[in-house]
Amino acid sequence: TTLTTWLWGGFSINDPTLTRFFALHFILPFIIISLSSIHIILLHNEGSNNPLGTNSDIDKIPFHPYHSYKDVLMITSMITLLLLILSFSPSLLNDPENFSKANPLITPQHIKPEWYFLFAYGIL
């Protein structure tokens, strides 16, 4: 009970609790970013250890000419495929409700938002 009293700021959840948790949620990302930055700086300066103690540079290839070209090729092909689908059959990715004729005198029974707004609609 001592820990909950200290955490809540009293015997029940009240204004001090909200203030403390708001401060925690505000400060915690800065702490995580600071610790991650220190970790990256230390890795950059000191390097990482190989637990086996063997030379691991034998099987490595450079990232830029090999993997970056593959990434650019895949992104280009996916965008091209998406544009082809949207150009030749746009109704595949469209909501079927959009094809019905609109009647301004009747409200639909169930109004559902688009998929990218469903998370906010679920909160209501």
Image (cartoon, rainbow, N blue to C red):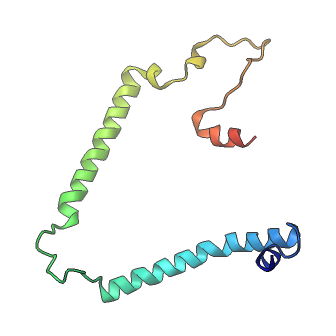
50 or 80: nearer the viewer: 50
What is the quadrant of residue 1 in the picture?
Answer: bottom right
- Residue in the image at 77% along x and 17% along y: 107
23 or 99: nearer the viewer: 23
Q: Quadrant of the C terminus?
A: top right
**Residue 10 location, x and y as percent?**
88, 75
Q: Is residue 74 above or below residue 29?
A: above
Relative to residue 99, is residue 61 drawn left or right?
left
**Residue 9 location, x and y as percent?**
84, 76
Q: Is residue 103 above or below residue 79?
A: above
**Residue 99 location, x and y as percent?**
57, 14
**Residue 118 location, x and y as percent?**
63, 38
Relative to residue 55, is residue 4 drawn left or right?
right
- Residue in the image at 12% along x and 69% along y: 59
What is the quadrant of residue 78 in the picture?
Answer: top left
- Residue in the image at 70% along x and 38% along y: 121
